[in-house]
Image (tube, helix red, strand yellow):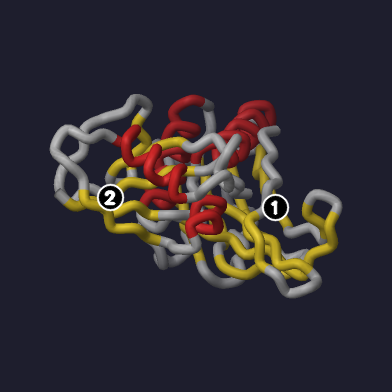
Amino acid sequence: MKITVKCFSQVKYALETDELSLELNPGQTTADVEERVRQRAGKKLDGVLLRTAVNRIYVKEPRDLEDGDEVAFIPPVQGG
Amino acid sequence: MKMGMKWPLFHQSRADKVVLTEIVPAPIVPFPSDNTRREEGAELVFNGRVRGTEQGQDILALEYEHYEGMAEQELQSLADETMAKFLIQDLFCRHRVGRITIGEASLHVAIWSQHRKEGLQAMTYFIRELKERVPIWKWAILVSGERVPSECVHRD
């Protein structure tokens, strides 16, 4: 199955892209995707706390993903 | 209330409360002060403006990035929650995104309440939570022209 990862702020800077398309195996979770994102970033995201959103809603615990899901790892926000 | 609607003036007390949130890509048009209200004794206005430094470094501007779709949703949901939590009549918020030069407003919030205390508490809560959960980020445009994610985070 295929999912999209939206990248913002420090994640975008670290990965040098605003979007990734990833192939996942059934049963893989948001935690697996975060690990892949962090690996891809090398050490650039070390120490950066990332919150997870699936289909534009924050999720607190790792959860299974479905084909077509949109995932984002949200660095500390800075509005205002 | 939908975006782009004509600004209402309230000539009499209303049972219905109004919440408006917008994320706009252009300079913020402030909400007009309202001299026609009969029940709200407090009209609070907050403008957040871009400073000339980020973490001690001189900058040319800030560029605000948002997660389109989610940022609007979170901002509206926070405004609704603030209305439910505090005894206020109306809450309006405009947040600007894109490149904003020093001194310009990035955030504009107006709250009307019967009394000052509830309005001030609601304003503090709304802005604090906005900085905690609405997916908007700042990129600093340095004097060298380089564009880097700001590491500046304020909670209070």
Residue B155 appears in which quarter of the rendering? top right
Where is residue B129? Give x, y as percent: 56, 35
Tell me how many marks there are. Answer: 2
Can residue B114 be spotted in the picture?
no
Disc number at residue B48? 1
Q: Nearer the viewer, mark 2 or mark 1?
A: 2
Residue B97 appears in which quarter of the rendering? bottom right
- Image vertical order of residue B107 relative to residue A51, above or below: below
Residue depicted at 38% across the width and 46% down the height: A72
| Chain letter for the residue marked with disc 2 in the picture | A
| Chain letter for the residue marked with disc 1 in the picture | B
Depth check, front residue: A66 or A44: A44
- Image vertical order of residue B93 relative to residue A61, above or below: below
In the image: residue A33, left or right of residue B123: left
- Which amino acid type is marked by label 2? Glu
Residue depicted at 37% across the width and 60% down the height: A19
In the image: residue B146, left or right of residue B79: right
Q: Secondary structure at mark 2?
A: strand
Q: Which residue is mark 2?
A: A70
Tell me the CA gap for discs 2 and 1: 31 Å
